[in-house]
Amino acid sequence: MTGLKVDIVRVDALDEAAWADWRAMLAADPSLNSPYFRPEFAQVAGRISPNAAVAVFSRGGQTVGFFPHQRRGGAMQPLAAPMNDYHGVIAFPGQAPSLEEAAAVLGAARLNVTAWVGETALGEDRRTVQVELGEGGYAGWYADRRANQGKFFKDKERARRSMEAELGTLRVERGLRDPALLDWLIALKRDQYARTGRHDIFACGWTAELLHALLQEDRDGFGASMAGLWAGDRLTAIEYSLHAGDQYHFWFPGYDPALARCSPGILLSMDTMRLASELGYRTFDFGFEGEHYKKYFCNGARMVREAVVLKPGLGATVSEAAVGVLGAPGQRLRTSVRRRWAAIEACETTSGARFRGAVQAAGAALAKVRQSTTRSVPA
């Protein structure tokens, strides 16, 4: 593609004609069928994420695509990173600029994407996984899973009976928008980050504010809500999700760690799918593969790309050197460190906060190396 130009505008500066183009592009391209691509998500995140904007791509005076994003110093990320699970240029099929073309005209010192949907030869593949309900709905999916993964699901049925016997009748509710429940979930996640040495993405403030703001959205089939599982009077698990059309995206799960033996988070996901399927949801997206339970649940997958596009020159050299210093030899560890840094950079809006996060990430990476080395030494 040639003659690509870009205008950077505030999200709230787009007029209704631009939003109409945006919606038409989504309707024309099934690969953009995710809540993260919806105008409502961009509008809410654009109000809250610092330095948010939309890149409006054009060719020959005609708009050909939109890329909602945020800037942190000279770096650019998709809007609402590190919490944005799918991103790319919203465009009609065949008209979207590739990642390489977009980066060239955007001119950022560094463009970091973790789940790019669209054309690119850069980076590496990552896989996200889904539950796709067929004509049999939830009941058909569960019957198939139980037949093919019987041991796993029988174990969860026993866990359900055990928790009910110990704590009281189980009750699940979805469509919850109580801010106090969200605060409970955020506290659980922050405790988890502290225990595992991961960067606390909620310490910066704006990320929690975004989740609260999205809970207030319920328009044009788009919204965010939570589901909760109670055993007797005890809240055992909460899951925060985005949903639009027939897509239901599980986003932030949390459960009472004292009840881990009963798998309350897994039970909640199952009950949430059952209830949401009755409302017409057919795809339940679990995000990136990795957690062991997802292989038992999911019968669908899609590929996205993770890449860092560096502007040629000193900035690229310094960036690569920084990752090398923070990490250690080995591509796997370098990738882990780069992901940690991407999350820190996206969350934190000041150089001091980014520095403190980098120091923490370096310590966690070195501890991981030492632990791996210790394990590999024969007794």
Image (cartoon, rainbow, N blue to C red):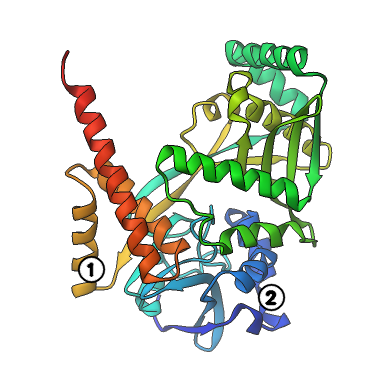
The quadrant holding residue 294 is top right
Q: Nearer the viewer, residue 150 or 65?
A: 150
Q: How many labels does the image show?
A: 2
Residue 343 appears left or right of 320: right
The kind of secondary structure element at disc 1 is helix
Q: Is 296 located above or below residue 120 in the figure?
A: above
> Which quadrant of the structure image shows residue 274?
top right
Residue sitting at x 26%, y 48%: 334
User: In the displayed structure, does residue 12 sit left or right of residue 85?
Assistant: right
256 vs 70: above or below: above
Q: Real-space Cα distance between discs 1 and 2?
A: 35 Å
Where residue 189 sits: x, y (%)? 56, 43
Residue 319, position in %: x, y?
Answer: 24, 64
Q: How far across and down, in percent of the image, does residue 17 sit?
A: 70, 82
Q: Which residue is the site of mark 1?
A: 316
| Quadrant of the rendering where the C terminus is positioned | top left
Question: Of tags 1 and 2, which is closer to the observer?
Answer: 1
- Residue 23, visible in the rendered structure: yes
Residue type at tag 1: Ala
**Image position, residue 242 (x, y; %):** 68, 51
- Label 2 crowd (10 A; few <14 / some 14-19 / many >=20): some
Q: Would you name the residue on which mark 2 appears?
A: 19
Q: What residue type is labelled 2?
A: Trp
- Is residue 136 visible to the viewer in this orientation of the structure? no
| Residue lying at the far bottom of the rendered structure | 61
In the drawing, does residue 362 fall left or right of residue 118?
Answer: left
